[in-house]
Image (cartoon, coloured by chain):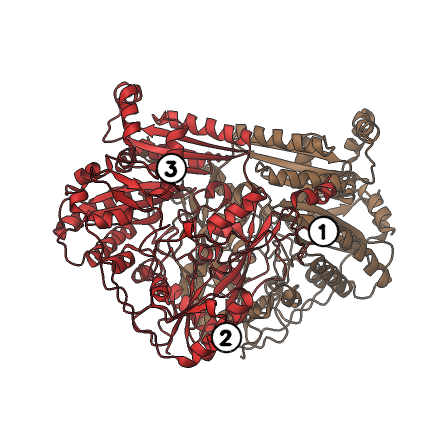
Chain colours: A brown, B red
Amino acid sequence: MFKKILRNLEEIIPDQKTHVSGGETRFVPPPPPSENDDDAENMWGWGFEDSQFRVTDEGHVVLSGDRYSISGVEMPNLLPWMSDVLRSELGPEHSVEPPRDPEVPEVTDAPELYAAIEEHFADEQWSLDDTERLQHGHGQTQEEIYAINFGDGFSRVPDIVVYPGDHDEVEKLVELADRFDAVVIPYGGGTSVTEALRCREDEERPIISVDMSRMNRIRWIDPVNRMACIEAGAVGRHIEDQLGNFGFTTGHEPDSLEFSTIGGWVATHASGMKKNKYGNIEDIVVDMKVVTPQGTIEKKTSVPRESTGIDPMLWMFGSEGNLGIVTEVVVNLHEVPDCQRFGSVLFPSLEEGFGFMYELAQSGCVPASVRLMDNTQFHFGQALKPEKERLEALKSGLETFYITRLKGFDPEEMVAATLLFEGRQKQVELEEETVYDIAERHGGVPTGAENGRRGYDLTFGIAYIRDLVFRQHMVAESFETTVSWSQALQLIENVKRRTHREHRRRGLPGRPFITGRVTQVYDSGVCIYFYLGFYTRDVDEPDQVFHDYEAAIRQEILDSGGSLSHHHGIGKLREDFMSEVLSEAGLKSKERLKSALDPDNIFGATNQNVGRGIEQ
Amino acid sequence: MFKKILRNLEEIIPDQKTHVSGGETRFVPPPPPSENDDDAENMWGWGFEDSQFRVTDEGHVVLSGDRYSISGVEMPNLLPWMSDVLRSELGPEHSVEPPRDPEVPEVTDAPELYAAIEEHFADEQWSLDDTERLQHGHGQTQEEIYAINFGDGFSRVPDIVVYPGDHDEVEKLVELADRFDAVVIPYGGGTSVTEALRCREDEERPIISVDMSRMNRIRWIDPVNRMACIEAGAVGRHIEDQLGNFGFTTGHEPDSLEFSTIGGWVATHASGMKKNKYGNIEDIVVDMKVVTPQGTIEKKTSVPRESTGIDPMLWMFGSEGNLGIVTEVVVNLHEVPDCQRFGSVLFPSLEEGFGFMYELAQSGCVPASVRLMDNTQFHFGQALKPEKERLEALKSGLETFYITRLKGFDPEEMVAATLLFEGRQKQVELEEETVYDIAERHGGVPTGAENGRRGYDLTFGIAYIRDLVFRQHMVAESFETTVSWSQALQLIENVKRRTHREHRRRGLPGRPFITGRVTQVYDSGVCIYFYLGFYTRDVDEPDQVFHDYEAAIRQEILDSGGSLSHHHGIGKLREDFMSEVLSEAGLKSKERLKSALDPDNIFGATNQNVGRGIEQ
């Protein structure tokens, strides 16, 4: 039977198969679709160009295009609800158009380097163009997006963008950087939210941004051994599409799935929404290949799990471009699940919701994803509903009656959990039974699959909202932490209290918007994801105000027992807090590792402050 | 409800509670039981002194003491069966008594160092005694145990053994080693099977063995956040006993559980039998504290999961004493499961057994443990049965009839799987249903819980057998690998063929004993655990013959796509193979990390050859 499974491979492997070395069970899938114009990305903010929030003359909010469940749907309640929360005037009449006129610093003088790049790379593989350089000099933090939309841009951006086509070209590029005393900063999907891509003003050497987008192929799929080797520049949506054609998934689903790359997931130590079933990135990765100043670090065989001593592969998780460029990653594959179901539950209070999450986490029977939204976020979700749904809800009335009257839920206290079950049917059924049993013990009322699905769908569409709020004189950003179960409720309370205190202290207009949701559960605690927003009309340098404001809240998080980050990382945004989370010897050891592997600081992104001590 | 859970803590926490800093949910459990004489360990081989295999005058084998399920049971079939397999004469009349007269090299001259140790440590915390030094200079490899039983011992052993009582004393000791140019080698349970504890003959500096056995306390248990902080010298059996008193388990169960330490698990990158449910050591560890030449690396908060950049904690997995001493480890806890069930299944052939394992691994519903024994190991298990059971089996006859006649199983082909289910009852029931459904599709016949339990019980008792086989003019050892599913059957066949070929080539008497079992399943492959044994009467230097023989088989494993180790590690035993598994840049990077963190090679165990290049 087992050998038969292997022989049956012929049926699994498509016609266009090309066996590759390393095992007769591997085949090469077709290349990813070449991008068409419809997939053009928005250089001024998040996501695709065709998907942008706009405010109609009636003050209804609409997401353009047709990519998302909320695309093209008029949402009349959003701005009124936000106005109320912020105690500020929002609406079409208050809209401001971003000038979008950032300056781009001149290219650093380094003719020999550029000539060498020209010699080794095709014309379409490198660029000194200002727009491309600007785009490669930032990620998606609030401060960065503000700088290009409303500010002066950046005092330093990469000097040249190079697009290597394979591993050997990355090696060549690192060699050139070494020879011509240049800096190399790897660039994946550009979705960093830690200023990891930002260049330091004091970097005097030429900076090469290594855009990995051409390295977007799946090098092989091994359907028998459930592995795939993927080039580091492949983005999540293409990876999942291509694997899906053969019935497989990695199961890794960060909120940035559409744009972020597998190399970026390794470098930032990423987490996926469905980690309860598939694990976080460190659980999914079997093997990798990394170009470093010492040469290419790779193993000779990709095997399930090893104990072969000190493992340089582990150093790459969280390396944030400081140590090398990941060029290929071997991941575990899973069958696309038989069964996928959504669910949702309302709880009378955040405390009851936490009780549910805690008991569920300890049950050993946790669905692929479970999230818990606080009361503000619950209402936010309601405000995103189109008029039609609101009317239907009014019409039926029954659900509302049941929840707020019969069960006595306080609309200002109740919270919502969304659930995603994935796997074989019987496992899903057992998880559902477990979840709803536990929910009942905590006063939870199931509110159906559709509300759950809606919650998950919103994840991708809602990411575009920052560009909307910018135009309404607001700044907004998310940040996250991990914290033990027993400290979690207090941390949320502290963060909310601090948010209001800092708002008052800074004399900002109206009231702040602060909401949190639990996005991941672990044995020992949770990941909490916060959104912070506030009104900034007539506020000087709102980006700087935001920066300081967020730092104050981060300090509150640390003081409340939270971590510096669960999955966003450190970059430059949180580097000043490193000494509050790691001992001096730990910091020194990181610096020593860096100096030992990259003594000339070629990988000079200097994230986490690593490499800052190296004399140029 | 959630706050109530926290308040209910009073019921969970015992009377002798002492709250510790870092959270009101932590308490300090009572210290581990002090060792009594019954727990004295055998300095000449594996395990407890009271548990030793002996051969009766009738040639029956008996394990002394009463610790294990097989203790005190006469096994009449073992020696006859082994004689037959080995085509060699075994029995009481051929027994040889090991002379056990190893030499112990003199203490290296370093009076100032010893005086400084005497000054800072109590008298019972250090020793220059020959026996203690000898014991601390080796682990449990075949070659090492042979050397002390039949050989001349070792040309180099530690000069002094020091027993620090807490983290600060470890720091002090490392400081003294630095000041007096000495080498420090951490010593946990002494169960290394990679010569990681062996001292190199050419080490001229004084060697301090740091025995961690006094650091055996659980510093705190946090029943709410499901964590415990455990000193690195605590051994598995005490950890599980103490946690079990409060209803918790780590779920980590290596075969060496009784003797190995949690610090050792981290340093060797250990794997536990029940990893399908609880994970391997890297999944279980939340946080750790490590003394290095750069100072103490530690985090300020123990949180579930973080993305806080390059993480020095990850360097410690597989560090094998080369980088520092782990002093404390924070682990995840789980409730002792409601339900624990065993199971077993017979399959007509290894191939069918593999088909079962493969399909089970992909089902997403894998029990805590599943193992598959090849035909030889199945018969080995039968040969370990006492006379009574053999008679009963003969008497009933029915089972044998059903399996070998009705089902047409060939006794020389069939293989056995053992199963351990753990968790909540419904999850266990679903796993059982899944397992037996899949087994049926592969021609499997369930053979009951008792056979399964017996299989797991044997793990601990059988570990003593090497000392028996030594006395019967045999050498025997286990080794392991990971390999992809599609290469696994071929690897087993290659290893068996190579074993016979090498046996003939070396002109060894009789025939070799070679058997394998799958001990772990992963998405992409399996861990295979082999036992090799052969008869060595009138063979010169059987330990050296074994060493070369095993190396040849290891080469065969690598050539067949297997890893260098799944959980045993590298140590010195497999260091020569490192360049076959990791690229040159990878090896160089390891060496650079070492030189950067420990430039004077204080942690001079030089496992994996790391640090060998540093000039003293």
Do pointers 3 and 1 mark residues of a single chain? no
Q: Is residue A394 left or right of residue B286?
A: right
Circle 2 sits on which residue?
B175
Q: Is residue A114 visible?
A: no
Check disc 1 and report the residue beneath it: A530
Say above or below: A79 vs B300.
above
> What is the three-letter code of the residue carrying label 3?
Ser
Which of B357 and B46 lies nearest the eye of the viewer? B46
Return the residue at label 3: B69
At label 1, which amino acid type do we have?
Answer: Phe
| Label 1 residue SS | strand
Q: Give how far apart the Cα atoms at labels 3 and 1 are.
A: 55 Å
Q: Quadrant of the N terminus of chain A?
A: top left
**Position above or below: A63 against B214:** above
Question: Is circle 3 on the same chain as circle 2?
Answer: yes
Chain letter, disc 2 residue? B
Numbered disc 3: what chain? B
